[in-house]
Amino acid sequence: MKFFVDTADVDAIAELNELGMVDGVTTNPSLIMKSGRDILEVTKEIAGMVDGPVSAEVIATDADAMIAEGRKLAKIADNIAVKVPLTWDGLKACKVLSGEGNMVNVTLCFSANQALLAAKAGGTFISPFIGRLDDINLDGMELIADIRQIYDNYGYETQILAASIRTVNHAFQSAQIGADVMTAPPAVIKAMAKHVLTDKGLEAFLKDAETAGIKIV
Ligand code: G3P
């Protein structure tokens, strides 16, 4: 499974990147706002740090303006994936931008039918938002499973990018269902390393090492 990091915080990306945990990065206008930086400048820096796709999102809402913004974003670096919202105009922009050879990430997906349209429009990635469905008492994981089944039924190559991941359980279940990629905040990726029995076991081992006077270097 590929791991994308859902942040525009370059320090957090660098830390995970050193461990080989970063196959790509996703950003959105809210994450750019949080970084406090200029979108073009921070996106360029991120794209230079990682080899994989870096999603940068358009802010226009009509297709022609999205296409113009997408072309500008795509010029930042070869590994930019232009992110467009899953609206009718977003699908039009997806078709044109992907036809020009750009990676396109179709975002704000909340239904399997939307995901089917994104695949037909040539999307490189489809981003179903798990956490936001859970927020309204729907099952985000069911959506991932439905899209997996539909894409596999017809051999669509659009990659399922499980997004709006808020918990380690979201990460585990996305992997179990077979999402191609998950994008998660750095804190969720780091939390995946945690287990109470690991901490407890380590504490006991260290106590015994001290009692036995074990020294290695
Ligand atoms: O990947 C999309 C993500 O940034 C949205 O996450 O937690 O704002 O729903 P969230």
Image: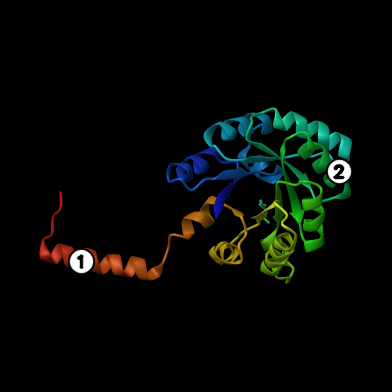
Query: Measured along the vertical axis of the image, is residue 202 above or below residue 180?
Result: below
Res. 207 mark: 1
Q: CA distance from mark 2 to mark 1?
A: 63 Å
> Which residue is depicted at the point 69% across and 44% down?
28
Residue wearing tag 2: 92
Q: Is residue 82 left or right of residue 207?
A: right
Q: Is residue 139 among the parts visible in the rendering?
A: yes
Query: Where ligand 1 lies, by quadrant?
Result: bottom right
| Residue 36, percent from left and from top | 63, 37
Q: Secondary structure at mark 2?
A: helix
Amino acid type of the residue that numbered disc 2 sits on in the rendered structure: Lys
- In this view of the protein, which residue sits in the foreground, 35 or 167? 167
In this picture, residue 101 sits left or right of residue 24:
right
Query: Could you tell me which residue is drawn at 71 percent across and 32 percent down?
Result: 74
- Residue 72, horizontal then vertical, whole percent: 75, 29
In the rendered structure, the answer to whether residue 87 lies left or right of residue 210 reads right
Q: Is mark 1 within 8 Å of ligand 1?
A: no
Q: Amino acid at mark 1?
A: Lys
